[in-house]
Amino acid sequence: MPRPLWSGAISFGLVTIPTKIISAREDHSIHFRRVHLKDMGRVRTRKICELDEKELSQEEIGTGYEVSKDEVVPVTDRELQEMPLPTAKAIEIVAFVDADTIDPVRIGESYYLGADGQVAAKPYTLLRKALERSAKVAIAKWAWHGRERLGLLQVKGGAIVLHAMHWPDEVRSPESLVPKPVELDEAEIEQAVQLAESMTTDDIAQFREHYRDALEELIEAKSEGKERPAPPEAGGVGESGKVMDLMAALNASVTAAKEKRGGSGEGGTVHEIRPRRKSPAKKPAAKKTATKKIMASKPERKRSAS
């Protein structure tokens, strides 16, 4: 099991659940060292005091807050840990909400919450069952890495997941990024919708990172003294400032999607892009009246006891 990043408890009303935070993600990135290009010697980051110009060990380094240019107030790790916060060593659940009311932009890193010992098994399962049966997510607060944080708890595969969340004032408004109004033909919108439908898939697990594969090939070629892989031909990017023929681009996209699906053998169906037929004009007043009469004639069903 991965090393826990944090240990404490979930505070669920008067219920306390000993728990630990475990990263929900694994790092598969290729990491580089900083080196001296002349002799490939490793270049390290040295921690130097700017007053006496001496290199310091980690034990000699603390935390300070700059009150003014000439005054710094030291704050120790112990003082941070002993701050009078109810969330200092607890993930305090403060509310339950419907999952679809959460703005995805506010969701950050994800972590698994593991039950810390057998004593936590029953209250942990209780919270999990409550989340599953209510179909809601829990909003929680906890202190971590020098600040109080907001989080979201939900269930995945029988485990409780903690998603770190941004506070409302940390999310920028997108209003300044919205382009100026433009004119679009209804046919162009319909074509774009049908292109999206033709690219729909039920399985996103098929996608993988190709940058890492290319990077491994480059490193292998250089380590063996071989010629490095040739870069791919540029394509698919329009010239800057050039007016695009949207209809032509949409049709070309569908053709490319057909070729890709057919050549790779990947699942999914590619549909022809055809303008949707407009439904004949309806008489709304007559239909609404008929609907009301039918609804009124149906007897009300009794709800079964849950």
Image (cartoon, helix red, strand yellow):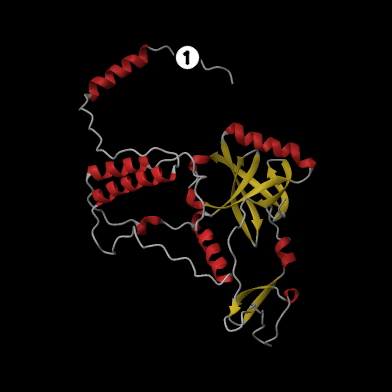
Q: Is mark 1 on a helix, strand or loop?
A: loop
Sort mark 1 into few (<14), some (14-19) or many (20+) by Cα contacts within 10 Å: few
Residue at image location 26% in from the left, 38% down from the top: 274
Relative to 76, does residue 117 appear above or below in the rendering?
A: above
Q: Quadrant of the C terminus?
A: top right
Residue 174, horizontal then vertical, whole percent = 39, 56
Q: How many marks?
A: 1
Q: In this view, does 141 lie to the left or right of 180?
A: right
Q: Which quarter of the picture shows residue 265?
A: top left
Residue type for callout 1: Arg
Residue 44, horizontal then vertical, whole percent = 65, 77
Residue 131, horizontal then vertical, whole percent = 61, 36
Relative to 158, does residue 293 appear above or below in the rendering?
A: above
Q: Is residue 213 left or right of residue 283?
A: right
Q: Name the residue under label 1.
A: 301
Residue at image location 34% in from the left, 48% down from the top: 256
Residue at image location 57% in from the left, 40% down from the top: 137
Of residues 199 and 49, the one drawn nearer to the viewer in this rendering: 199
Relative to 222, does residue 163 appear above or below in the rendering?
A: above
Residue at image location 70% in from the left, 85% down from the top: 54
Q: Which quarter of the picture shows residue 138?
A: top right
Of residues 69 and 190, the one drawn nearer to the viewer in this rendering: 190
